[in-house]
Amino acid sequence: MTDTKIVLWRWVGLQCSVLVALAGVVIARGFIPFGDFGLAALAIGDVFSVRTPTTGMPSTAWWTVPGSDLRHPGPLHFQLLAPVYLATGRSPWGLVFSSAIFAAAMLIAMLVLAWRIAGPLGVRLVGFSSMIWLLPSMTMVAPWNPVATVLGTGLALVSAWGVLTRQQWVWPWLVFAFSLTIQSHLGAPIVMAVIAAYVLFAAIRDARKHGNPWTFTEILVAMLVGLVCWAAPLWGVISAPRNNLTELMAWVSAGRDNSGASNNIGIVAYVLLALVFAIVVVVVLTRKTLYSYEGKTAVSLRRLTDLYLAAIAGVIVTLVVAGFGTAQFLFYATPIFIFPFVTAGFVGSFRRGRSASEARVPRWLVALVVIGPMSFWMYFYPESWLAAARYSDHVQLSTEKVLELEGTRDRPVVVSYPGYRWNPVAPAIAAELAANGIDVRIPNREEPIRSDPLWWRETPVEGPHL
């Protein structure tokens, strides 16, 4: 094995080890799919059924527009988690296990792409950045759509970097990453559209100047990847007159509402502060240094900083067009802010006279980033998760009692409880019943999209109520 591959596999091993540790702690503490995790478990379990979901999780947009029943754009995250979750018998530990495998696969993809784009320097840059914005949190091994948003944004930036450095094999990865990010969160399309517009512009300009490096086969594969990723959302739009697209149009026509910003003032402050610092770091420090150097590495990093500027522009456009209510998504798009700072650190090593191959992260700093947050989360385990775990016996007992009822398997069972999405018991009971083959229904909000295959579970029906 070459020295460059050793660097790659060291980072792969480190990140996978952290994910294994996180998953082990969560499973050992008695994880149950409460709140949104329970809704996700229902959706993931439906992926290979006739009721396969065509949208993502319910959006908090209904906070700002009363009566809105808007969902996040697509179910790609559900589809990626489904094989492992179903193979484990739809168990709570299988939900954690599938989420950990998904996160590991995304991280490995980013590291391998970075290695092929920029060698050891790319691996260290992406590896250390992802350690900062991914691994310290227990949610990395939970079926939560913001996790897919963070991972998708990171992979999108790395893939776009590959396109800008004329890597002809990277287009399918770019299409997949953009699809995952956009489908996982309603706040993503504007940022991703701005980045995509810049990448296409730069790719066309580069092709005219240096020749087209992409073949018809590579473009065709990228188009097929896009078709597969968007097949379910497109079918949801085509098959129902009232669908997520019509809900989005109704939500937009209701007018932009920044009331969500007042509920997330800390997130808004973080986004604005990170935005200012990212601009200063990229424009004033990093680019000024890079343009004083020549060579393949300097050119590659210059194109990476151009990409950062496009992403930052996307953030600004999102805030202007959609308002500060989108700050929650921009918080989940943390890679846009973290990547520039880590890149600046590597570029700073050039100023101290080191070559690109010598630019590396000090081991003590890696240890600090890993051990510090890991120790914190393992000691201060999230209280909401602990509270939910205390009900595991109640979930099992409730499931057994329902299964004992006569005719339970012949008609739907409605799992109803106030504050359903944030209740520690109801979603877990619903997921456990579904795992046992029960036709579970859940409380609907004001006007559910009854024709959507996932949210058929929200239709009021006659049957036993819990």
Image (spheres, rainbow, N blue to C red):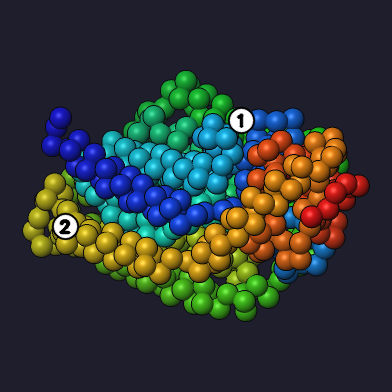
Report the front residue among 35 and 243: 35
Residue 401 appears at what percent x and percent y? 74, 48
Residue at image location 83% in from the left, 53% down from the top: 465
- Residue 413: horizontal and vertical position, in percent? 81, 46
Instruction: Please name the amino acid that badge 1 sits on.
Output: Leu
Q: Residues within 10 Å of mark 2 (few under 14, many from 20)?
A: few
Amino acid at dot 2: Arg
Label 2 – label 1 distance at C-alpha: 43 Å
| Residue that numbered label 2 is attached to | 363
Visible in this render: residue 277?
A: yes
Under circle 1, the secondary element is: helix
Rendered residue at 51%/77% (across/down)? 266
Q: Are marks 2 and 1 in contact (CB under 8 Å)?
A: no
Is the residue marked by circle 1 packed among few (<14), some (14-19), or many (20+) residues within 10 Å? some
**Residue lying at 31% horizontally and 65% vertically, measured from the top left:** 375
- Residue with the most extreme left position: 353
Out of 452 and 209, give the one closest to the viewer. Answer: 452
Q: Callout 2: helix, strand or loop?
A: helix
Q: Quadrant of the C terminus?
A: bottom right
Pointer 1 residue: 227
Sequence-earlier tag: 2 or 1:
1
Q: Is residue 330 visible?
A: no
Q: Position of residue 9 (x, y in %)?
A: 24, 39
Left-right relation of 381 to 264: left
Task: Please tell me which residue is depicted at 20% across the width and 62% down the height of the picture.
Answer: 365
